[in-house]
Amino acid sequence: MKNITGNLKKDTDALKKLLPAEDILTFSFVSQDGLAFTVVYADPICDKELLGEQLIRPLLHYSGEKSADMIAKSITSPEIRLQNSMEKLAEEVLAGNPVLLWEGMDEAVVCGTKKMFVRAIAEPSTDVAVKGPREGFIEDVKINTSLVRRRLKTGELKIENVEVGRRSKTVVAVCYLEGTTVKRTVEDVKKKLGEIDIDIVPDSSYLTHFLSSRPYSLVKQVGTTEKPDIFCAKIAEGRVGLIVDGSPIALTLPYLLIEDFQSSEDYFVPPYRATFTRILRFLSLVVAIYLPAFYVSAQLFKLQLFPVKLLLTIAGSIRDIPFSPSLEMLLVLFVLEVLNEASIRMPKYVGMALSVVGALVLGETAVSAGFVSTPAIIIVAFSGIGLYAVPNLIEQTSVVRLVMLLIAGSVGTYGIILATAFMLLYLVTTENYGAPLLSPFSPMIGRDLRDSVVKYNLGSLKLRPKTLGSPNKRRLK
């Protein structure tokens, strides 16, 4: 690793050789007593106004002792570091921090005057709540960690920065409560982060593959949130939180499946209302996954599942349909997925119009033309709405719904039951960082059931979840 030599021209040329890009600029000047300086900075991401006010202007009138410590003290920037490694200095310049070199000194000063381009803190569009805090994470790691610090005003909160990505050098803030989070979990998370060898980390979702015990599993194994209040609450239970620079989505570990059936609003409404909405989410997801499959299975293999009046209605609707029940349902699901994808990718107002056209014009036309039946459209529409009751599981459950539909069209009801048993077996045997995915149901943990599908009042939640194994068990006295 090459170090600063003290020869200003040689050191400047060596640093420019490491950073040959045209937007890496240098500015040379001489102080009042004749000491030569050179500043190396990245033009697009360095705040040149702060650079002039906090670094160059004080040094133009400098006439004190020619030592690194004294020169650093004369600079008015609150963020100053001394560094002598050329590679480290190059990384600082690329991060937006200018580097000050001067004749005769084998150390350089790094000044924190990077230019910040951030959006305002606002409520995340993916997690809207009627009651509770409105703040959401943004794409800057320092602002996000400050939102966490503001809620957890304790010295036990540890925030350790880890760089991930060979070229991006993305900062990942590892957040946990010392004495509350299991040390082994923290060590395992940091170890896995250190083993990641990838060019660039543009978003936190890139890390989920490396942090999962089963990277190729269809099931989620890393929790996600955009809200600081949820993030802090999970850390307080004994989890490890990860905030990735450039991403508004924070990660939490270990992850339990029951987390996605819970909402931040559940803790700001009466317990009976929270219990009702959680049961409603669970039932909506079950119906969304199984309703198309059982409809197809009943038509093909078991017509007795339909009540007589409903059977007559369905028979009248499907009499002239040219497709088989399974092919018809697949066609309607395909159209639904295409409309959903198009409405998301297209501009906002065009997407809204497209949804209306797809729902009214295409649906009505397809029924009138005899391509699909009315019950099929109703079932697919209800299934699509049900998936959005648990938005964090849409990617996984939409695939499971399709698999169940294919099995129902091939084997029937017995195939659905066998596939469900296999899926439950897989979920029961999945764990991450020592926490079973289906806890507190498998294994059954009585005290953790108080904040699962059923929500007890705050006075009953005196202990932290046993699943997480926190050494600090009590959270309410």
Image (cartoon, rainbow, N blue to C red):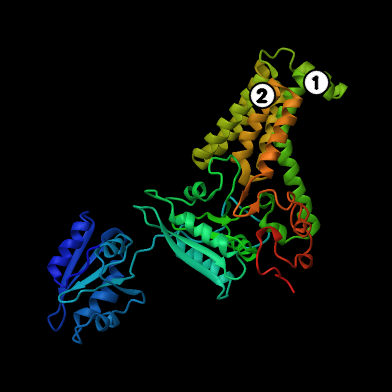
Which quadrant is the C terminus positioned in? bottom right
Q: Residue at x 19, y 79 (%)?
A: 60
Q: Position of residue 74 (x, y in %)?
A: 27, 82
Residue at image mark 1: 302
Q: Is residue 222 left or right of residue 266?
A: left
User: Horizontally, is 159 left or right of 332 in the view?
Assistant: left
Question: Residue 353's image quarter?
Answer: top right
Q: What residue is shown at x 87% (from left), y 21% (from top)? A: 308
Alpha carbon distance from label 1 to label 2? 17 Å
Quick check: 460 left or right of 22?
A: right
Q: Is residue 85 above or below residue 130?
A: below
Nearer to the camera, 249 or 406: 406
Going by the numbered disc 2, the residue's amino acid type is Met
Left or right position of 255 against 92: right
Q: Which residue is mark 2?
A: 329
Q: Quadrant of the N terminus?
A: bottom left
